[in-house]
Image: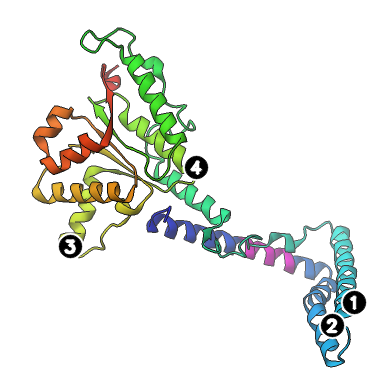
Amino acid sequence: MAYSAQTMRQARQRYQAQQREREQEADRQRQAAYAAEPRLRALDLRLRSTVAQVMASAFEKRSDPEQALRQAREANLAAQAERTALLAGLNMPDYLDTDARCSRCGGTGWQGQQLCGCLRAQCRQVQMDQLASLPGKNEPGFDSFHLDVYETRTEEKLQISPREQMRQVLARCQDWAARFGPGSPSLLLCGGTGLGKTLLSACLARTLTMQDVGVVYTRVSAMLREYENAQFGGAERPRAYEETQLLIIDDLGTEMSTQFTNSVLYSVLDSRLLEGHPTVISTNLSSATLQQRYPPQLISRLLGQYELLIFFGRDLRME
């Protein structure tokens, strides 16, 4: 499934609420039109019943059904023309145009086994709302990621400036997002605090949300808390972290490290790798510190099967 069950549930609730609002508005317009011109009620009844009546009559008399359909169409066109003229004379909108149902899916949200565009748009909006607390929300895509805040002075050890390094990291993330799909490599954003890892992760999340990709963005501590509640508190197991098309985990290394948390992290990352679901992880820890903190099985996933993107320079939050 492209979207998590929680996102789908919230999108469905919004979708149904909007349908109810449109239905209420259409009914309000209908009643106002009927009060202003009672003939409209009779015309609407005639339009709903014409086809059924003519076809029933044709079968009873064993007459030509095609001729009956022609008669039904002519009667309908005449009734439509009359009600259009009445509404125009009243200078009122056509309440039938306020139909709450999508013409493609009939209001179900699905076209066969495919998600209809009407419900998909709601899923996109739910995800964008979930990302609203992250930095860069007022600029689309990667536009909020500004390279000019990084230093141009070359680091002697690395033989590259922070700005040039971040130009390459940004270009890689943009290309990764453009080519995103099942089997895309997972990314490990690694570097000190205040270097733009969270901002760049948010850019990825918003860009892929607009590409109709199911995205779950979480801090590592929040994710582990949900698994703890499921394990020890009887809550439902949070399957979204394993099933979503893209999982973004922020601040790896800030959680309390225990056998349980390490087991959960390994289980989530390993299952996603096996299913070909990409993951983006950001951490303030260096690769050397990661190896000291986590067990070898987890490190083999992080440093062996993730593409490492290095951030360095001065803490931009202190500038």
Question: Disc 3 or 2, which lies upstream in sequence?
Answer: 2
Labels in figure, total: 4
Give the residues drawn in magenta, as a range.
22-31
- Residue type marked 2: Val
Q: Quadrant of the C terminus?
A: top left
Please tell me whether residue 24 belongs to the stretch shown in magenta.
yes
Q: Which mark is residue 211?
A: 4
Label 3, label 1: how far apart the Cα atoms are: 67 Å
Q: Which residue is mark 3?
A: 233
197 vs 294: above or below: above
Q: Which mark is residue 157?
A: none
The prevailing secondary structure element of the residues shown in magenta is helix
Label 2, label 4: how far apart the Cα atoms are: 48 Å
231 vs 60: above or below: above
Q: Is residue 191 visible?
A: yes
Residue 10 in percent (x, y) is at 44, 57
CB of mark 1 within 8 Å of CB of mark 4? Answer: no
Residue at 40%, 15% in the rendered image: 148
Q: Which residue is mark 1?
A: 71
CB of mark 1 within 8 Å of CB of mark 2? Answer: yes
Q: What secondary structure is found at the residue carrying circle 3?
A: loop
- Residue type marked 3: Gly
CB of mark 2 within 8 Å of CB of mark 4? Answer: no
- The one nearer the camera, 126 or 216, is 216
Residue at 84%, 61% in the rendered image: 87
- The one nearer the camera, 55 or 124, is 55
- Residue type marked 1: Gln
Question: Disc 3 or 4, which lies upstream in sequence?
Answer: 4
Quadrant in which residue 176 is drawn: top left
Label 3, label 2: how far apart the Cα atoms are: 64 Å
